[in-house]
Image (cartoon, rainbow, N blue to C red):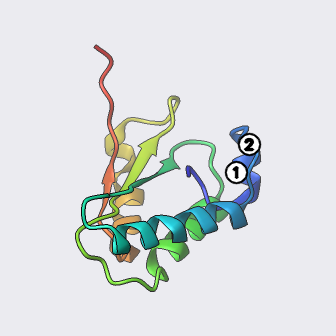
Amino acid sequence: MESIDTPTLAYIGKPLDESSVGEAFRKMLDINATYKNIEVTANFLIGKGLSDEHYQSLKTLLRDTGVDFRGKGMIYLSPLKDSPKKRELLPLINKIQEQSKMPAYVYLIQRL
């Protein structure tokens, strides 16, 4: 999903808008609530160069989700390639985690 902010989606080159991401998010929640053996997760971007609106819309989405979390549907926060060191992102990550009704984790990938 990467962002729920239309200007941010345009900035990263995604041909989507916030309404289509919101619809996908609601579909994710519906699938996770309906199917016992299926889990859908979501990635959202964090890092240098993203607007305050990006973060505010993400916090609002995760805070106002209106669904009872049942152990499925984790949120992963993916640092942009040119982001500062992960430790410098911790205050932002903590704010997002505090407001989220769903577990949110930093998504780290190792290149092998």
Residue lying at the far top of the rendered structure: 112
Out of 67 and 9, give the one closest to the viewer: 67
Left-right relation of 80 to 33: right
Which of the image's four quarters has the C terminus? top left
Q: Are marks 2 and 1 in contact (CB under 8 Å)?
A: yes
* Residue 15 position within the rendered picture, expressed as x and y whole percent measured from the top left: 76, 45
Count residues near mark 1 (Cα–Cα under 10 Å), then give few for <14, some for 14-19, many for 20+. many
Q: Residue at x 53, y 73 (%)?
A: 61
Q: Residue at x 38, y 55 (%)?
A: 41
* Residue 35 position within the rendered picture, expressed as x and y whole percent measured from the top left: 33, 67
Tag 1 secondary structure: helix
Q: Which residue is mark 1?
A: 8
14 shown above or below 62: above
Count residues near mark 2 (Cα–Cα under 10 Å), then give few for <14, some for 14-19, many for 20+. few
Out of 20 and 95, give the one closest to the viewer: 20
Quarter of the image for residue 4 reads bottom right
Give the amino acid at mark 1: Thr
Q: Which residue is mark 2?
A: 11
Quarter of the image for residue 24 reads bottom right
* Residue 85 position within the rendered picture, expressed as x and y whole percent measured from the top left: 38, 35
Left-right relation of 71 to 102: left
Left-right relation of 36 to 73: left
- Residue 75: mark: none
* Residue 49 position within the rendered picture, expressed as x and y whole percent measured from the top left: 63, 43
- CA gap between label 2 and label 1 equals 5 Å
Q: Residue at x 33, y 84 (%)?
A: 68
Tag 2 secondary structure: helix
Give the amino acid at mark 2: Tyr
